Image (cartoon, grey):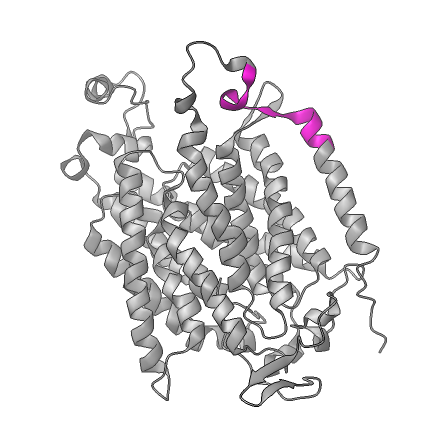
């Protein structure tokens, strides 16, 4: 059987140039500065240090580190696919962010015929970028850069529309993005990998292995993500005590999941040793699990318990659920995103619903109606006037009860999962088109297919020097599934 060409010489430059022309054209006609970046809006009353740049840029910088260094290093765990993991992450993230500025901007920052651009737009766009990179993990090593760009091109609009619909019509609480980021990204990625199913990979692949150096690089990515995750979860929360709680809960949840991961890794290993895949991935579970309730008064103890629960679910998912999905449901989740983002996202969503049901003025005081703004009294309600005396600037809400808000949260969870799954499957079918340079089964997880690699890229360093190994035709071990 003749293999289809995987040369990027025409495909990649043509696609990138086309995308750049489209982006420049749209930026020219539809993008302008927001008030804080527009010189015409500045006057002698303007206080430069009150510019939103100084409030939002530190968080933006932290998220930048997570996107380009954290995700990039974490994805470089394959011994022969370090270039692909890091560089394709770099390429996909750069395009996805530019594209999301336009697509999200139309739904969230569009007025007077223009998208008004500020740092907060960039933060939102990088959240959309994170969605794409999480989904990328499900097909790591099995797709070309052309396919990844097309996936980002299609996923960002589906995500932006879903986000807009949920925020506009369901009006939920999801400060850390457990529903709109983690669940959406997970089930979109699973839909894509379902459509791109490769039966031969169920038996393992000779190049689906790690090395000492690649594992060290990957755990560096874990450390960057771990350190900056509090900024990710707190980026768009209300400034003040809400953001303060978000940082505290995220840090506590991460600490809990880290200790639990080390304990379970040694306990579940038949030799009683630590597994690097667990250290690289399961330690991050707490950051996801606290997401939906991260700004609420759940208590530090609850954040700790959520970290432990998320870690346990994530670890057991790697051991038992991922092999089942691959063997029986045609879902080859290459990086185990269902464990770190799906299972933990569901736990987080459930915790958020419980926290909403338990929320009362006894715990929150009048600020209950700021944190759960849709529970605030409606316009004209005498109670609203009384609350506005205590909290100047409090906006009218929808007068929802806790039970009503919880039902909207449930609707958002299942609606998001459904839209993401269908969108992922349809995107995967598009990626099967023969002109997108898809690698054949033998060439998966190998940088040589798309990169000029150095002569020693497939060499292993030992006590006796370097040993170069030809992995073609060698029976390899199926590596432990990993997560983003």
Q: Is residue 443 left or right of residue 410?
A: right
Q: Is residue 121 left or right of residue 148?
A: left
Total numbered labels placed on residues in the image? 0
User: Whole-percent x and y of residue 85?
Assistant: 60, 63
Q: Quadrant of residue 257?
A: bottom left
User: Whole-percent x and y of residue 193?
Assistant: 61, 64
User: Whole-percent x and y of residue 188?
Assistant: 56, 56
Q: Which residues are magenta?
A: 25-39
Q: Is residue 30 magenta?
A: yes
Q: Is residue 478 left or right of residue 344?
A: right
Above or below, 112 relative to 102: above
Q: Residue furthest right?
A: 2
Magenta stretch secondary structure, dominant: helix
Visible residue check, residue 342: no
Q: Quadrant of residue 374?
A: top left
Visible residue check, residue 440: yes
User: Whole-percent x and y of residue 81?
Assistant: 63, 70
Closest to the observer, 238 or 262: 262
Q: Residue at x 67, y 30 (%)?
A: 27
Q: Quadrant of residue 306?
A: bottom left
Q: Residue furthest top?
A: 44
Closest to the observer, 73 or 178: 73
Q: Residue at x 54, y 72 (%)?
A: 214
Q: Is residue 359 magenta?
A: no
Q: Residue at x 55, y 74 (%)?
A: 326
Q: Residue at x 49, y 14 (%)?
A: 42
Above or below, 468 relative to 222: below
């Amino acid at each position: 059987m003749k293999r289809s060409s995987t040369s990027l010489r025409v495909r990649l430059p043509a696609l990138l140039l086309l995308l750049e022309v489209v982006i420049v054209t749209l930026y020219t006609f539809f993008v302008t500065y927001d008030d804080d970046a527009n010189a015409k809006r500045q006057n002698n009353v303007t206080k430069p240090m009150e510019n939103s740049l100084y409030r939002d840029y530190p968080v933006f910088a932290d998220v930048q580190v997570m996107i380009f260094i954290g995700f990039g290093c974490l994805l470089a765990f394959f011994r022969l696919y370090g270039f692909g993991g890091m560089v394709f992450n770099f390429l996909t993230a750069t395009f996805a962010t530019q594209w999301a500025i336009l697509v999200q901007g139309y739904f969230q920052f569009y007025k007077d015929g223009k998208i008004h651009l500020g740092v907060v737009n960039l933060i939102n766009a990088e959240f959309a970028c994170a969605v794409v990179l999480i989904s990328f993990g499900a097909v790591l090593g099995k797709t070309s850069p052309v396919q990844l760009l097309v996936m980002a091109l299609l996923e960002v609009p589906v995500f932006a529309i879903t986000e807009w619909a949920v925020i506009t019509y369901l009006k939920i609480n999801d400060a850390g993005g457990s529903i709109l980021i983690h669940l959406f990204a997970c089930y979109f990625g699973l839909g894509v990998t379902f459509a791109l199913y490769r039966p031969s990979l169920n038996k393992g692949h000779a190049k689906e292995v790690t090395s000492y150096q690649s594992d060290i690089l990957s755990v560096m990515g874990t450390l960057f993500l771990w350190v900056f995750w509090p900024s990710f979860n707190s980026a768009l929360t209300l400034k003040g005590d809400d953001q303060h709680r978000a940082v505290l809960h995220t840090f506590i949840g991460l600490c809990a999941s880290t200790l639990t991961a080390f304990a379970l890794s040694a306990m579940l290993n038949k030799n009683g040793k630590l597994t690097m895949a667990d250290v690289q991935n399961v330690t991050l579970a707490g950051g996801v699990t606290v997401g939906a309730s991260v700004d609420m008064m759940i208590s530090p103890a609850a954040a700790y318990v959520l970290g432990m629960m998320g870690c346990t679910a994530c670890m057991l998912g790697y051991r038992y659920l991922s092999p089942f999905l691959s063997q029986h449901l045609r879902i080859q989740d290459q990086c185990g995103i269902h464990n770190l983002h799906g299972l933990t996202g569901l736990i987080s969503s459930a915790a958020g619903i419980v926290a909403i049901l338990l929320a009362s003025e006894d715990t929150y005081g009048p600020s209950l109606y700021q944190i759960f703004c849709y529970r605030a009294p409606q316009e004209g309600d005498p109670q609203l006037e009384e609350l506005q005396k205590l909290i100047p600037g409090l906006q009218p809400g929808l007068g929802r009860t806790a039970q009503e808000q919880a039902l909207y949260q449930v609707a958002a969870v299942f609606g998001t999962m459904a839209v993401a799954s269908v969108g992922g499957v349809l995107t995967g079918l598009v990626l099967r088109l023969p002109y997108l340079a898809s690698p054949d089964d033998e060439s998966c997880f190998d940088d040589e297919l798309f990169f000029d690699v150095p002569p020693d890229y497939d060499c292993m360093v030992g006590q006796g020097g370097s040993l170069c190994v030809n992995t073609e035709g060698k029976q390899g071990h199926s590596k432990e599934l990993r997560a983003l």
